[in-house]
Image (spheres, rainbow, N blue to C red):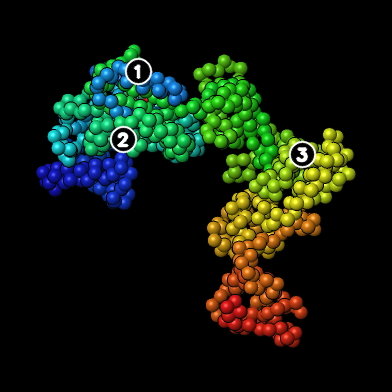
């Protein structure tokens, strides 16, 4: 290939890669497959190997980082990168608006509302369309030069196009884009898992992970970190004039920068406030962390008139969400025994307020979680409380250690029963495997009686612990053996409360199969799975006898729950428990929709034999049961119908002897008509 031909082909392939890069990373709407993209990239790399003069820093092949540097150079921001003033409630936001109204006078006034994504502010400079300089905000006047690092961020354009641009807007000779480098929550979690697996530093939150990844002297490592970027404004611009913030965002998008899809422009301030509020409500559902919304006055002329006070512009304000993180002391680590025997380490914290709630406990998940973060008792730690979930300890602040902090070790024995605890290969959790462990029983009883399960009114955690401690309960079935004498003899337990509780226990017997199956607390069998299972097998007895592949054939049931259930059912102790519950008079059947709608086969017993022409044995059974009929295994005088197919054997002979009606598949299906 001639040098000219190579250069021409390079231009073509590079343009295609830029286009598809933008579709993939910025617009999130790829047009070609990953494989097709990789082929283009390989071709570009090969061209650059054969013709090294084609390679440049802004080539799409250069997202891989540069050789490590000794230090970051300093960059002076010609236009300072200011910070933002904060409002922590609506009243503060409204005071800000009043001041803006007063100061703006007759100047045009409208509002842009943008999410405040939690990351690291950067400036990216383009000269004649090529990325020439990247820097952190630093102190606002002087930042650190991180050009090679920023080039590795996939949605930062390396190049801005000459065309297509809106009419009358040439590509600027100089353009400084400003925005935030951040990490998506899913990317952050994947990165942390990977870091932990390699015994590398685990990051406290997406913000720290983004900052730590971007400010690496070795940009080849930055290239491997899943960083994202969004542009929220401009610094220096030469060769183009823009009227305001909203127009700037659209213009940046035209140039190929990612902008927030959630930015909005309002002429009415009340509408802007409503929008911001709707944003706060969906905070937890986003795949990136936002710590507030930013209100900006749109017109640049008005912005200029309002000016800057200290380091904060008067024309913008961040309305911060209630904090979700705080720093406090890790006083101690205790362990709890869960329902399945799982041992959960739990953090005891110096009480701290997070978003209006006092937090003094937080989960630490398991031993690895503590070890990966090198959490020590006495550490100052970052704690997060988001939504309704249990607070968790994110990370220690090792720079605040004074040497008195102590490492923690998983105890070797169960804190409840004293038996040794163990960790199975491939499992992150430790377990107490003693089936008679009282702590496990307390958790099982708590779960059994809880609202989503058997829903026994007035039976809470305290009673569960007390009854186990008093030796009244050895398994959950013992709940139904509690007597008036036993209860009324307990200190502080009057006759009224005893009879009330016994009445509630009695009532729960009729709850039926789905609550009971949920109450058993089988792993991966919650109320939703229980309902699906009961639709397939409307009797608990039949369900527990079913093989895993029969369970998997039920719509919505996967191999994990199927296996877990059959495994549970295979234990003799569990079988005894079910017998005990049945003997106590608990309803073990599932009343299905069809049953209530007329039940054509109610009270009828069927036996299936031989190979039916179209239905499998399982389908025929389901079809009969869906109509209220029962299918049993052997023929007796109580059998109403024998359904016989090809090569039927002894069951057919027996049915004939007992004069039981014999149906073909066709006759069976016609019975329903
Ligand atoms: S505007 C005067 N817009 O928040 C304009 N900042 O607390 C200054 N940030 O340093 C920035 N999202 O790192 C702006 N939509 C957004 C933002 C945003 C996040 C960050 C940015 C800034 C900090 C100020």
* Residue 673: image location, x then y, percent: 57, 78
Say whether residue 88 is visible: yes
Q: Residue 652's spot in the image, x, y percent?
A: 68, 83
Residue pictured at 59% horizontal, 43% vertical: 427
Nearer-the-camera pick, 23 or 454: 454
Distance from disc 3 to disc 2, alpha carbons, whole Å, reads 56 Å
How crowded is the residue under tag 2: few (<14 C-alpha within 10 Å), some, or many (20+)? many
For the point 44% across and 22% down, the residue is 91
Residue 64 shown left or right of residue 658 in the figure: left
Report, in whole angstroms, how far the alpha carbon at label 3 lies from the one at label 1: 59 Å
- Residue 216 percent across, percent down from the top left: 37, 27
Left/right placement of residue 117 relative to residue 299 reads right
Relative to 93, say whether 264 is above or below.
below
Q: Is residue 209 left or right of residue 76?
A: right
Q: Give the Cα distance between marks 1 and 2.
A: 29 Å
**Above-or-below relation of 380 to 589:** above
Q: Nearer the viewer, residue 77 or 373?
A: 77
Q: Which residue is mark 2?
A: 259
Mark number displayed over residue 99? 1
Q: Residue at x 34, y 23 (%)?
A: 316
Q: Tell me the residue that label 3 is attached to.
A: 463
The answer to which image quadrant residue 288 occupies is: top left
Marked residue nearer the N-terminal end (3 or 2) = 2
Question: Label 2's element?
Answer: loop
Mark toward the start of the polypeptide (3 vs 1): 1
Element under disc 1: helix
């Amino acid at each position: 290939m001639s040098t000219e031909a190579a250069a021409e082909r390079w231009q073509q392939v590079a343009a295609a890669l830029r286009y598809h890069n933008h579709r993939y990373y910025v617009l999130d709407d790829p047009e070609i497959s990953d494989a097709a993209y990789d082929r283009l990239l390989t071709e570009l790399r090969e061209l650059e190997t054969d013709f090294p003069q084609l390679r440049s820093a802004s080539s799409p092949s250069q997202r891989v980082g540069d050789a490590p540097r000794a230090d970051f150079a300093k960059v002076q921001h010609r236009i300072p990168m200011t910070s933002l003033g904060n409002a922590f409630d609506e009243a503060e936001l409204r005071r800000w608006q009043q001041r803006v109204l007063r100061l703006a006078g007759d100047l045009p006034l409208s509002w842009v509302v943008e999410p405040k994504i939690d990351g690291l502010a950067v400036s990216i400079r383009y000269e004649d369309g090529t990325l020439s300089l990247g820097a952190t905000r630093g102190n606002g006047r002087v930042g650190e030069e991180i050009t090679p690092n920023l080039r590795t961020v996939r949605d930062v354009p390396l190049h801005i196009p000459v065309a297509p641009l809106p009419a009358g807007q040439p590509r600027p000779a100089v353009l400084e884009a400003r925005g935030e480098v951040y990490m998506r929550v899913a990317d952050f979690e994947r990165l942390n898992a990977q870091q932990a697996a390699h015994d590398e530093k685990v990051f406290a939150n997406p913000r720290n992970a983004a900052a730590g990844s971007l400010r690496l002297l070795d940009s080849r490592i930055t290239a491997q970190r899943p960083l994202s970027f969004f542009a929220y404004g401009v610094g220096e611009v030469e060769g183009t004039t823009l009227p305001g913030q909203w127009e700037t965002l659209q213009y940046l998008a035209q140039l190929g920068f990612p902008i927030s899809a959630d930015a909005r422009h309002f002429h009415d301030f009340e509408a802007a406030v409503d929008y911001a509020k709707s944003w706060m409500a969906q905070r937890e559902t986003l795949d990136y962390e936002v710590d507030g919304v930013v209100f900006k006055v749109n017109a640049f002329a008005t912005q200029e008139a309002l000016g800057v006070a200290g380091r904060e512009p008067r024309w913008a304000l961040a309305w911060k969400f209630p904090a979700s993180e705080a720093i406090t002391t890790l006083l101690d680590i205790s362990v709890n025994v869960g329902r399945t025997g799982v041992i959960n380490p739990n953090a005891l914290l110096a009480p701290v307020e997070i978003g209006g709630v006092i937090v003094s406990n937080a989960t630490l998940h398991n031993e690895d979680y503590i070890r990966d973060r090198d959490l020590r008792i006495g550490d100052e730690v970052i704690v997060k409380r988001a939504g309704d979930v249990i607070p968790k300890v994110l990370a220690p602040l090792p720079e605040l250690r004074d040497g008195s902090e102590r490492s923690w070790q998983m105890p070797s024995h169960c804190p409840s029963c004293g038996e040794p605890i163990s960790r199975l290969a491939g499992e992150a959790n430790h377990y107490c495997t003693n089936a008679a462990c009282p702590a496990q029983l307390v958790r099982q009883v708590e779960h059994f009686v809880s609202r989503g399960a058997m829903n026994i009114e007035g039976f809470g955690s305290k009673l569960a612990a007390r009854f186990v401690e008093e030796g009244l309960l050895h398994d959950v079935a013992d709940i139904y053996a509690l007597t008036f004498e036993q209860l009324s003899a307990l200190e502080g337990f009057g006759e009224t409360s005893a009879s009330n509780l016994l009445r509630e226990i009695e009532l729960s017997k009729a709850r039926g199969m789905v609550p009971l199956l949920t109450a058993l607390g089988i792993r991966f069998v919650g109320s939703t799975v229980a309902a699906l299972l009961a639709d397939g097998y409307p009797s608990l007895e039949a369900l527990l006898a079913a093989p895993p592949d029969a369970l998997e054939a039920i719509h919505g049931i996967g191999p994990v729950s199927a296996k877990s259930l059959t495994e549970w059912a295979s234990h003799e102790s569990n079988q005894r428990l079910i017998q005990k519950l049945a003997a106590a008079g608990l309803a073990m059947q599932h009343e299905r929709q069809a049953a209530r709608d007329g039940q054509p086969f109610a009270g009828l017993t069927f036996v299936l034999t031989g190979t039916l022409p179209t239905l499998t044995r399982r389908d025929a059974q389901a079809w009969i049961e869906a109509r209220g009929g029962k299918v049993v295994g052997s023929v007796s005088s109580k059998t109403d119908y024998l359904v016989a197919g090809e090569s039927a054997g002894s069951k057919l002979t027996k049915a004939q002897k007992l004069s039981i009606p014999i149906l073909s598949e066709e006759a069976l299906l016609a019975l329903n008509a």
